[in-house]
Amino acid sequence: MEIFKVIVDSTTSVFKQNGFRKKLNNFYIESSKNYAVVNFQKSKESTKQTTIFTINFGVYSNVLGQFEHRHENLVMPQIEQCHWHARIGAFMPGSPDFWWKADISDDISNIVSNLSVTIQNTIIPEINKHISDEDLIMGWMNEGFWGTTEICRFRYLTTLLKAKGDISTLNKIAEACMQKFKGKMNEVSAIEHLQEIGFRI
Protein backbone atom coordinates (compact mmCIF):
# COMPACT_ATOMS: atom_id res chain seq x y z
CA MET A 1 0.00 0.00 0.00
CA GLU A 2 1.21 3.53 -0.79
CA ILE A 3 2.97 5.25 2.13
CA PHE A 4 0.86 8.39 1.83
CA LYS A 5 -2.40 6.46 2.09
CA VAL A 6 -1.11 4.49 5.07
CA ILE A 7 -0.16 7.72 6.86
CA VAL A 8 -3.49 9.45 6.16
CA ASP A 9 -5.50 6.39 7.16
CA SER A 10 -3.45 6.03 10.34
CA THR A 11 -4.58 9.46 11.56
CA THR A 12 -8.27 8.60 11.18
CA SER A 13 -8.70 7.51 14.80
CA VAL A 14 -7.45 10.79 16.28
CA PHE A 15 -9.75 12.75 13.99
CA LYS A 16 -12.75 10.55 14.76
CA GLN A 17 -12.14 11.03 18.47
CA ASN A 18 -12.62 14.74 17.85
CA GLY A 19 -15.81 14.35 15.79
CA PHE A 20 -14.34 14.48 12.28
CA ARG A 21 -15.28 12.25 9.36
CA LYS A 22 -13.03 11.25 6.48
CA LYS A 23 -13.41 11.62 2.73
CA LEU A 24 -10.39 10.79 0.56
CA ASN A 25 -7.45 12.85 1.92
CA ASN A 26 -9.69 15.23 3.87
CA PHE A 27 -11.27 15.25 7.32
CA TYR A 28 -14.39 17.29 8.05
CA ILE A 29 -16.39 18.51 11.01
CA GLU A 30 -19.59 20.57 10.86
CA SER A 31 -20.69 23.16 13.41
CA SER A 32 -23.80 25.30 12.96
CA LYS A 33 -23.61 24.94 9.15
CA ASN A 34 -19.92 25.95 9.11
CA TYR A 35 -17.31 23.37 8.17
CA ALA A 36 -13.73 22.81 9.24
CA VAL A 37 -11.53 20.97 6.74
CA VAL A 38 -8.18 19.25 7.30
CA ASN A 39 -6.43 18.36 4.07
CA PHE A 40 -3.36 16.14 3.59
CA GLN A 41 -1.47 17.40 0.52
CA LYS A 42 1.04 15.20 -1.23
CA SER A 43 3.94 16.94 -2.96
CA LYS A 44 4.53 16.45 -6.67
CA GLU A 45 8.16 15.82 -5.71
CA SER A 46 7.21 12.56 -4.00
CA THR A 47 8.66 9.35 -5.44
CA LYS A 48 7.95 5.65 -4.98
CA GLN A 49 10.58 5.58 -2.24
CA THR A 50 9.85 8.93 -0.54
CA THR A 51 6.54 10.60 0.22
CA ILE A 52 6.55 14.33 0.91
CA PHE A 53 3.39 15.86 2.35
CA THR A 54 1.97 18.70 4.39
CA ILE A 55 -1.31 19.53 6.13
CA ASN A 56 -3.63 22.38 5.22
CA PHE A 57 -6.67 23.23 7.31
CA GLY A 58 -9.39 25.83 7.29
CA VAL A 59 -12.92 26.95 8.10
CA TYR A 60 -15.76 27.49 5.64
CA SER A 61 -18.49 29.94 6.70
CA ASN A 62 -21.97 29.11 5.43
CA VAL A 63 -22.97 32.79 5.65
CA LEU A 64 -20.02 33.85 3.51
CA GLY A 65 -20.61 30.98 1.09
CA GLN A 66 -24.20 32.09 0.60
CA PHE A 67 -23.14 35.68 0.00
CA GLU A 68 -20.25 34.93 -2.35
CA HIS A 69 -21.44 31.97 -4.39
CA ARG A 70 -25.07 31.49 -3.38
CA HIS A 71 -24.01 28.15 -1.89
CA GLU A 72 -26.52 27.35 0.82
CA ASN A 73 -25.51 24.68 3.31
CA LEU A 74 -22.62 23.44 1.17
CA VAL A 75 -21.64 19.94 2.29
CA MET A 76 -17.95 19.05 2.59
CA PRO A 77 -16.31 22.06 0.91
CA GLN A 78 -12.80 21.80 -0.50
CA ILE A 79 -9.87 23.36 1.35
CA GLU A 80 -9.64 26.00 -1.40
CA GLN A 81 -13.19 27.11 -0.58
CA CYS A 82 -12.41 27.83 3.07
CA HIS A 83 -12.56 31.47 4.12
CA TRP A 84 -9.97 31.07 6.87
CA HIS A 85 -7.17 28.65 6.01
CA ALA A 86 -3.60 27.85 6.92
CA ARG A 87 -0.75 25.44 6.36
CA ILE A 88 0.67 23.78 9.44
CA GLY A 89 4.00 25.63 9.15
CA ALA A 90 2.23 28.92 9.98
CA PHE A 91 2.00 27.71 13.58
CA MET A 92 5.60 26.52 13.89
CA PRO A 93 8.54 28.65 15.07
CA GLY A 94 9.63 30.88 12.21
CA SER A 95 6.51 29.95 10.17
CA PRO A 96 8.30 27.67 7.68
CA ASP A 97 6.59 26.06 4.70
CA PHE A 98 6.79 22.73 6.49
CA TRP A 99 6.56 19.34 4.77
CA TRP A 100 7.04 15.89 6.27
CA LYS A 101 9.21 13.29 4.51
CA ALA A 102 8.56 9.58 4.82
CA ASP A 103 10.89 7.05 3.21
CA ILE A 104 9.75 3.54 2.43
CA SER A 105 12.25 2.23 5.00
CA ASP A 106 11.08 4.58 7.79
CA ASP A 107 9.16 3.49 10.85
CA ILE A 108 5.76 4.94 9.93
CA SER A 109 4.56 4.67 13.52
CA ASN A 110 6.98 7.43 14.56
CA ILE A 111 5.66 9.75 11.85
CA VAL A 112 2.04 8.97 12.76
CA SER A 113 2.82 9.61 16.43
CA ASN A 114 4.27 13.01 15.53
CA LEU A 115 1.24 13.78 13.37
CA SER A 116 -1.16 12.81 16.14
CA VAL A 117 0.53 15.24 18.53
CA THR A 118 0.41 18.00 15.91
CA ILE A 119 -3.26 17.33 15.21
CA GLN A 120 -4.21 17.33 18.89
CA ASN A 121 -2.02 20.21 20.04
CA THR A 122 -2.16 22.58 17.06
CA ILE A 123 -4.70 21.79 14.36
CA ILE A 124 -7.74 20.95 16.51
CA PRO A 125 -7.24 23.94 18.87
CA GLU A 126 -6.82 26.37 15.95
CA ILE A 127 -9.95 25.02 14.28
CA ASN A 128 -11.88 25.34 17.53
CA LYS A 129 -10.75 28.98 17.74
CA HIS A 130 -12.20 29.75 14.29
CA ILE A 131 -15.11 27.37 13.68
CA SER A 132 -17.99 29.80 14.29
CA ASP A 133 -18.75 33.10 12.54
CA GLU A 134 -18.28 34.87 15.86
CA ASP A 135 -14.85 33.24 16.19
CA LEU A 136 -13.97 34.35 12.67
CA ILE A 137 -15.05 37.93 13.42
CA MET A 138 -12.92 38.05 16.56
CA GLY A 139 -9.93 36.53 14.78
CA TRP A 140 -10.10 38.91 11.83
CA MET A 141 -10.42 41.87 14.17
CA ASN A 142 -7.70 40.96 16.63
CA GLU A 143 -5.23 38.34 15.39
CA GLY A 144 -1.97 38.91 13.56
CA PHE A 145 -2.60 35.79 11.45
CA TRP A 146 -5.74 36.31 9.35
CA GLY A 147 -5.68 33.11 7.33
CA THR A 148 -6.46 35.03 4.15
CA THR A 149 -5.44 38.12 2.17
CA GLU A 150 -5.99 41.66 3.41
CA ILE A 151 -8.79 42.44 0.96
CA CYS A 152 -10.53 39.12 1.60
CA ARG A 153 -10.29 39.68 5.34
CA PHE A 154 -12.00 43.06 4.79
CA ARG A 155 -14.74 41.53 2.63
CA TYR A 156 -15.37 38.58 4.95
CA LEU A 157 -15.33 40.62 8.14
CA THR A 158 -17.67 43.35 6.89
CA THR A 159 -20.06 40.75 5.44
CA LEU A 160 -20.28 38.86 8.72
CA LEU A 161 -20.73 42.09 10.71
CA LYS A 162 -23.55 43.14 8.37
CA ALA A 163 -25.20 39.71 8.69
CA LYS A 164 -24.86 39.93 12.47
CA GLY A 165 -26.39 43.40 12.53
CA ASP A 166 -23.39 44.93 14.30
CA ILE A 167 -23.52 48.18 12.36
CA SER A 168 -21.45 50.13 14.88
CA THR A 169 -18.44 47.82 14.52
CA LEU A 170 -19.02 47.61 10.76
CA ASN A 171 -18.81 51.40 10.51
CA LYS A 172 -15.53 51.46 12.43
CA ILE A 173 -13.95 48.67 10.39
CA ALA A 174 -15.10 50.15 7.08
CA GLU A 175 -13.82 53.61 7.95
CA ALA A 176 -10.43 52.36 9.17
CA CYS A 177 -9.89 50.07 6.19
CA MET A 178 -10.99 52.60 3.60
CA GLN A 179 -8.46 55.04 5.00
CA LYS A 180 -5.81 52.33 4.70
CA PHE A 181 -6.86 51.39 1.14
CA LYS A 182 -7.11 54.99 -0.09
CA GLY A 183 -5.15 55.46 -3.31
CA LYS A 184 -4.09 51.79 -3.32
CA MET A 185 -4.95 48.78 -5.47
CA ASN A 186 -7.62 47.46 -3.08
CA GLU A 187 -9.60 50.70 -2.86
CA VAL A 188 -11.93 50.10 -5.82
CA SER A 189 -12.61 46.49 -4.83
CA ALA A 190 -13.38 47.56 -1.26
CA ILE A 191 -15.81 50.27 -2.40
CA GLU A 192 -17.60 47.84 -4.71
CA HIS A 193 -17.92 45.32 -1.90
CA LEU A 194 -19.37 47.85 0.54
CA GLN A 195 -21.93 48.85 -2.05
CA GLU A 196 -22.76 45.18 -2.62
CA ILE A 197 -23.58 44.62 1.06
CA GLY A 198 -25.64 47.81 1.14
CA PHE A 199 -23.21 49.92 3.13
CA ARG A 200 -23.35 53.65 2.53
CA ILE A 201 -19.93 55.07 1.83
Image: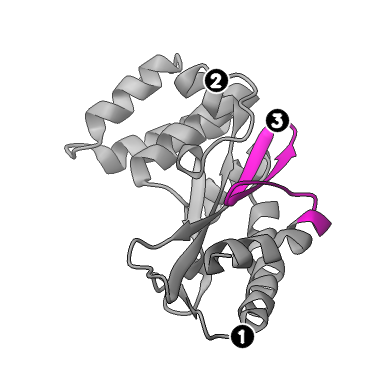
Q: Main secondary structure of the magenta part?
A: strand
**What residue is shown at x 54% (from left), y 69% (from top)?**
3
Which residue is rendered at x = 48% and y = 65% of the image? 54
Q: Is residue 10 above or below residue 111?
A: above
Magenta stretch, residue numbers: 16-38
CA separation in Å, label 3 and label 2: 12 Å
Q: Residue 151 appears at what percent x and percent y?
A: 35, 39
* In contact (CB < 8 Å): disc 3 and disc 1: no
User: Residue 73 at x, y = what percent?
Assistant: 65, 23
Query: Does residue 153 belong to the magenta stretch?
Result: no
Given contact means CB atoms under 8 Å apart, are the residues at marks 2 and 1 in contact?
no
Identified by mark 1, the residue type is Asp
The Cα–Cα distance between marks 2 and 1, rounded to whole angstroms, is 43 Å
Residue 27 lies in the magenta-colored region: yes
SS state under label 3: loop
Name the residue carrying label 3.
33
Residue 80's image quarter?
Answer: top left
Q: Is residue 172 visible?
A: no
**Camera-side residue of 90 and 41:** 41
- Dot 2 amino acid type: His
Quarter in which the N terminus is drawn: bottom right
Of the residues under marks 2 and 1, which one precedes in the sequence?
2
Tell which of 85 and 79 is nearer to you: 79
* Crowd around label 3: few <14 · some 14–19 · many ≥20 (10 Å): some
Q: Earlier in the sequence, mark 3 or mark 2?
A: 3
Nearest to the eye among marks 3 and 1: give it. 1
